[in-house]
Image (cartoon, rainbow, N blue to C red):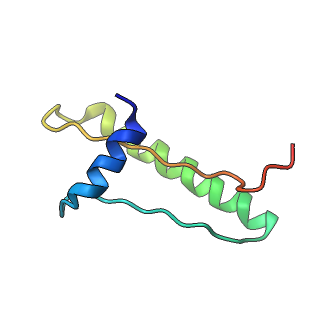
Amino acid sequence: MNWRTRTIHALDMDLKNNFHYSAAITLSRQDVEEIKELLIQNLKSANKIIQTSKEEEIYCLSFDFYNLIQTN
């Protein structure tokens, strides 16, 4: 099943241990690159933990960071 569809279902369930965040934001071009680098570094840190973690739970990890007004 598509993970995005599952996310919509999880939003409807409103479970306390779930974490969801979405926002349309405006920021400078310079800050776009800084935010993107922060997200990449956080993902790398999370992946280090994930690689050695015991397989006790299954979670969906997804995030997007993209220009809402595509100019290409």
Q: Where residue 60 sits: x, y (%)?
A: 33, 41
Residue at 31% in and 59% down: 19
Residue at 67% in and 51% down: 66
Q: Quadrant of residue 1?
A: top left
- Going by the image, does 69 lie left or right of 23? right
Q: Where residue 36 sits: x, y (%)?
A: 64, 54
Q: Where residue 3 sits: x, y (%)?
A: 38, 36
Number of numbered discs overlaid on the protein picture: 0
Q: Residue furthest top?
A: 1
Is residue 71 or residue 64 the one in the foreground? 71
Residue at 70% in and 56% down: 68
Q: In this rendering, is residue 52 above or below 8?
A: above
Q: In this rendering, is residue 31 above or below 59?
A: below
Q: Quadrant of residue 48?
A: top left
Is residue 22 or residue 32 the one in the foreground? 22
Q: In this rendering, is residue 63 above or below 52?
A: below
Residue at 22% in and 61% down: 14
Q: Residue furthest right?
A: 72
- Going by the image, does 32 lie left or right of 14? right
- Going by the image, does 68 lie left or right of 2? right
Q: Quadrant of the C terminus?
A: top right
